[in-house]
Image (cartoon, rainbow, N blue to C red):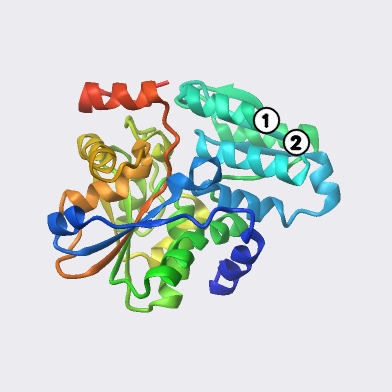
């Protein structure tokens, strides 16, 4: 589907547009897990998450006539903001289909970037059907959150930058929603360091990719109830699954309580604010789900789009939450 050359071309398009996000380390974290850990902090990316990389890479390859007609996307929040931001930079319009229970901070940010927002009920309606109908009605280009080679290649620049900065890794942990980030990162990492182990990380109530890899085919589950609103996919992407079943060494899970603990650790020990989905990969590491003793480990902190109200309520209420805090 994609190769390292696609990721490198995406990096060239993103040069000077996307942020080259920092790699953070913590002696406390290293001591806790018995490894040398490097956190790729995509919470400092434009739009607050890694999604800008794929969105801009995709939109920047559209021809002028397609840009004039505008774009349509569907997203629980971070891809929405990324497409809206990229559209504004490239001088086109964006219409975004978003769940009614999307956190208000993400809705406000998407509108703030200039996009039109169309809402739907994620538990009873299909965002794919709504997005496709809007794109056809408006003769616009549909920009999916992960089911596109240009999206995956753009997301793969996360691992490309990480490895360029810190050198070879033994293990790479990447959060999984639809699978675009981990597909791109695995493509880059396995090409640059053939022996690296790449693991996806999902919320334990939303482990559709883990189940699908075990079954050897795409499995659908009910829309998961989890605080990790960016990882509420119920079926792996068709294209992303083709990549991930070939390249991933496995998929780990983290509970909502473990995700909250990872968010608290990032805030208290590293002064980093991460949204639940952004802390999921670190949560699995802190919970001891990966064999990392004495090894060099990369971890994606994939996003930080969380309001003060939402962050405080999540940490105050603990794991009693059963869905995103709007």
How dense is the environment of label 1, judged by Cα within 10 Å: few (below 14), some, or many (20 and up)?
A: many
Q: In this rendering, is residue 110 above or below 304?
A: above
Residue 17, position in %: x, y? 64, 54
Q: Please name the residue shown 44% across and 49% down the image.
A: 42
Q: Is residue 235 something one can see in this rendering?
A: yes
Q: Is residue 268 above or below residue 218?
A: above
Identify the disc placed on residue 115: 1
Picture quadrant where residue 248 is located: bottom left
Q: CA distance from mark 2 to mark 1?
A: 7 Å
**Label 2 packing within 10 angstroms: few (<14), some (14-19), many (20+):** many
- Position of residue 98 relative to residue 85, above or below, is above
In the displayed structure image, the side of residue 91 where residue 251 appears, left or right: left
What x and y, as percent, mark residue 86?
66, 44
Q: Is residue 230 left or right of residue 64?
A: left
Which tag, 2 or 1, sits closer to the chain's start? 2
Residue 118, position as x, y percentages in the image:
63, 24
Q: Which mark is residue 93?
A: 2
Say if residue 322 shows up in the picture: no
The residue tagged with tag 2: helix, strand or loop? loop
Residue sitting at x 54%, y 36% = 75
Kindly check if marks 2 and 1 are in contact, taking CB atoms under 8 A apart as contact: yes
Q: Is residue 136 above or below residue 166?
A: above
Figure quadrant of the C terminus: top left
The N terminus lies in quadrant? bottom right
């Amino acid at each position: 589907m994609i190769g390292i050359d696609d990721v490198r071309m995406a990096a060239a398009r993103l040069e000077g547009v996307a942020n080259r996000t920092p790699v953070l380390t913590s002696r406390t974290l290293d001591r806790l897990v018995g490894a040398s850990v490097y956190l790729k902090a995509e919470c400092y990316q434009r739009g607050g998450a890694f999604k800008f990389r794929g969105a801009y890479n995709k939109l920047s390859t559209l021809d002028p006539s397609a840009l004039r007609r505008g774009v349509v996307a569907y997203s629980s929040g971070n891809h929405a903001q990324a497409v809206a931001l990229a559209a504004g930079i490239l001088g086109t319009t964006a219409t975004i289909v978003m769940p009614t229970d999307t956190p208000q901070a993400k809705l406000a940010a998407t509108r703030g970037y200039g996009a039109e927002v169309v809402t739907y009920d994620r538990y009873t309606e299909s965002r794919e059907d709504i997005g496709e109908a809007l794109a056809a009605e408006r003769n616009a280009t549909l920009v999916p959150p992960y089911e596109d080679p240009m999206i995956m290649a753009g997301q793969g620049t996360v691992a490309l930058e990480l490895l360029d900065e810190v050198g070879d890794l033994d293990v790479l942990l990447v959060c999984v929603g639809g699978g675009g980030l981990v597909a791109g990162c695995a493509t880059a990492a396995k090409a640059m360091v053939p022996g690296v182990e790449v693991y996806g990380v999902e919320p334990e109530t939303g482990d559709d990719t883990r189940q699908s890899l075990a079954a050897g085919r795409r499995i659908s589950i009910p829309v998961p109830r989890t605080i990790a609103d960016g990882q509420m996919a119920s079926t792996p992407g068709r294209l992303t699954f083709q990549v991930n079943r070939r390249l991933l060494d496995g998929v780990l899970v983290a509970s909502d309580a473990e995700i909250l603990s990872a968010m608290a650790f990032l805030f208290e020990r590293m002064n980093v604010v991460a949204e639940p989905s952004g802390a999921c990969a670190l949560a699995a590491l802190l919970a001891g789900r990966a064999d990392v003793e004495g090894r060099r480990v990369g971890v994606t902190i994939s996003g930080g789009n969380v309001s003060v109200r939402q962050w405080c309520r999540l940490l105050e209420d603990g794991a009693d939450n059963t869905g995103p805090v709007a």
